[in-house]
Image (cartoon, helix red, strand yellow):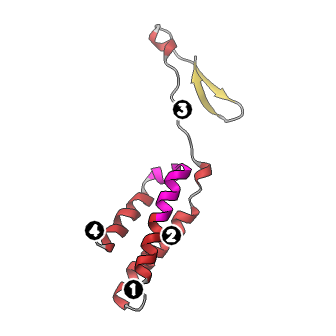
Amino acid sequence: MDIGTRVRVLSSKLDHPSAQRLDAEQFERLRAEVRTLRWVVRERLHRPEWADLIAQVEAMVDRVERLDPSLSVEVEVPSQAGVSQGGVAQPRVSPELGRVTECR
């Protein structure tokens, strides 16, 4: 795969909403991939035709560094037991988390 294609693929990953919900391991893999790409394009700093691609890679490195996997939002699937018995599930909001944690 050529470098231009790799830059486009990584840029698409960063543009996707799921990039805001990376766990620590996914974040580290993405970070390593972008930093490796940075190392590869820096070998071409002396070539003016690579200036745009190098700027894109540097911008991606900055974007990855701004991602914070500790702010990852977990999606919880509520229990549907009450619904299967013909009742309507009532959502329960956790006061600590401020989100629905289960349905009763």
User: Residue 70, relative to residue 48: is it above or below?
Assistant: above
Q: Give, as a three-letter code, the residue at label 4.
A: Met
Q: Give, as a three-letter code, the residue at label 3.
A: Glu
Query: 28 left or right of 99?
Result: left
Are discs 3 and 2 less than 8 Å apart at CB?
no
- Residue named by callout 3: 76
Nearer the observer: mark 3 or 4; the answer is: 4
State the image coordinates of residue 50 (x, y, percent, origin top left): 36, 84
- Give the magenta-colored segment's residue range: 17-32
How far is mark 3 from mark 4, CA to CA? 37 Å
> For residue 33, what is the image quadrant?
bottom left
Nearer the observer: mark 3 or 1; the answer is: 1
Secondary structure at badge 2 equals: helix
Q: Give, as a three-letter code, the residue at label 2.
A: Val
Give me the disc on residue 1: 4
Q: Give, as a three-letter code, the residue at label 1.
A: Arg
Secondary structure at badge 1 equals: loop
Secondary structure at badge 4 equals: loop
State the image coordinates of residue 17 (x, y, percent, origin top left): 46, 51
Q: Earlier in the sequence, mark 3 or mark 1?
A: 1
Local packing at callout 3 (Cα closer than 10 Å; few below 14, some 14-19, many 20+) is few
Q: Earlier in the sequence, mark 4 or mark 1?
A: 4
Query: 22 left or right of 99?
Result: left
User: Residue 85, relative to residue 13: is it above or below?
Assistant: above
Q: Earlier in the sequence, mark 2 or mark 1?
A: 1
Q: Is residue 26 magenta?
A: yes
- Residue named by callout 1: 44
Local packing at callout 1 (Cα closer than 10 Å; few below 14, some 14-19, many 20+) is some
